[in-house]
Image (tube, rainbow, N blue to C red):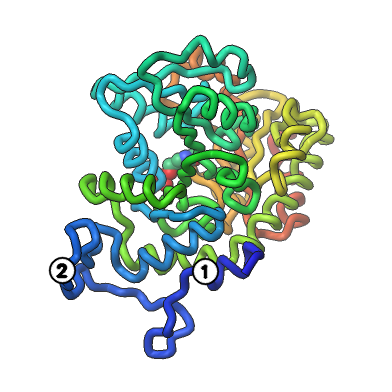
Amino acid sequence: MSDLKTKSLHAGALRPRIGGAVVTPIFQSSTFEYHGEDYHDVGYVRLSTTPNHVVLGKRVAALHGAEAALVTGSGMAAIAATMLTLLSSGDHLIVQDCLYGGTSGLLGDLTRLGIEHTAVDAQDPSSWRASLRESTGAIYFETLTNPLVQLADLEAVVEFAGQHGLVSIIDNTFASPVNFRPIAAGFDLVVESATKYMNGHNDIAAGCVVGSREQVEAIKRTLDHLGGSLDPHACFLLERGLKTIGLRVPYQSASALRIAEFLSAHPGVEKVNYPGLPEHPQHERAQRLLDGFGGVLSFELDGGTENAERFLGALELPAVAVSLGGAESLIVRPAAAVHSDLSPEERAETGITDGLIRFSVGLEDTDDLLADLETALQAAEGS
Ligand SMILES: Cc1ncc(COP(=O)(O)O)c(C=O)c1O
């Protein structure tokens, strides 16, 4: 079983099949017969020990080519459990400068608990050394940033972590194991919001942590105490969603590339951010590191916020909504939604202008999406 598509269907499947069922049934039981196990291994939903959790753990590990994986109640549950396992009061963490807003918020909470962090310029590895402290225990990056779709020097992150004895952690949500496999690239731990590409259907919240057996086991113990397990029905949906990841993500990546090319050639569009475009500042690195450039792009229209709002209002297919990676295309103006808690000055510092639009390309036919975009662009300009 070497191909990701085959693994996404069969890795870790229950054998013998339960009652002959081809699909893993939903084990809707909060507790299971006790056979003398230690506390963290007892069959109990919150301890992520039901057959649904066990199958998913093995499947996600196989997709990432890792020893072990754990599914969680959300991406943030995965990130919080990971940080709280690796870091204690007095410890320090190096993070990349532009992080997902929920993660930035969590870092603020961790500061209150005595866990400090320093944000570094993701594109300038020579500057990272200055942020090292005796107490630095880990380095945390994201594969593709939100919403500007920048790709950090991930090879340098792995090298830096190795040189300084840091645990390297990457949030691989935007890439999924289809576009990038961090374990093979040398990262110690991967966290993902499985709400996005892993599940791919805009219908559950879930997360995962991937790494060595020892690390994942330690993080599971923290998750057990935080109470962040995934419920069995959501496990079933995630297992079902995962089965098509090897078909969905390459299609979304190819579709996003065509849409990025269309937008960058359009006279009404000022700027397009997509690593598949030759003019993207990290295009060469993206070609080397990624298998496909992902399904998310962002762009700015001429005419700023007002035109952007008219454009969003004229679209028929993409829903104006937060989140990404699902079957239905989603589109949002980050300054009005995902990054609305930042001041205009803070947003400007990170390059998120008020008119910037983030587009998560779904599974609709690319030509239908292009036609919808063209009509909405004309409506935005014409009024
Ligand atoms: C890059 C990234 N990481 C983590 C998360 C958090 O995931 P969840 O909403 O599943 O908790 C998100 C959610 O948008 C995200 O975009």
12 is higher (above) or lower (below) than 350 = below
Q: Bin the neighbour count of mark 2 within 10 Å (Cα to Cα): few under 14, some 14-19, many 20 and up.
A: few
Residue 374 falls in which quadrant of the image? Answer: top right
Q: Bin the neighbour count of mark 1 within 10 Å (Cα to Cα): few under 14, some 14-19, many 20 and up.
A: some
Gap between marks 1 and 2 measured at Cα: 28 Å
Q: Which residue is mark 2?
A: 36
Is residue 41 or residue 327 the one in the foreground?
A: 41
x, y percent for residue 319: 55, 49
Q: Which residue is mark 1?
A: 11
Nearer the observer, disc 1 or disc 2?
2
240 horizontally vs 383: left or right: left
Q: Amino acid at mark 1?
A: Ala
Q: Is mark 2 within 8 Å of ligand 1?
A: no
At a point 75% along the width and 29% down the height, the residue shown is: 280
| Residue 354 visible in the displayed image | yes
Is residue 135 or residue 326 the one in the foreground?
A: 135
352 horizontally vs 339: left or right: right
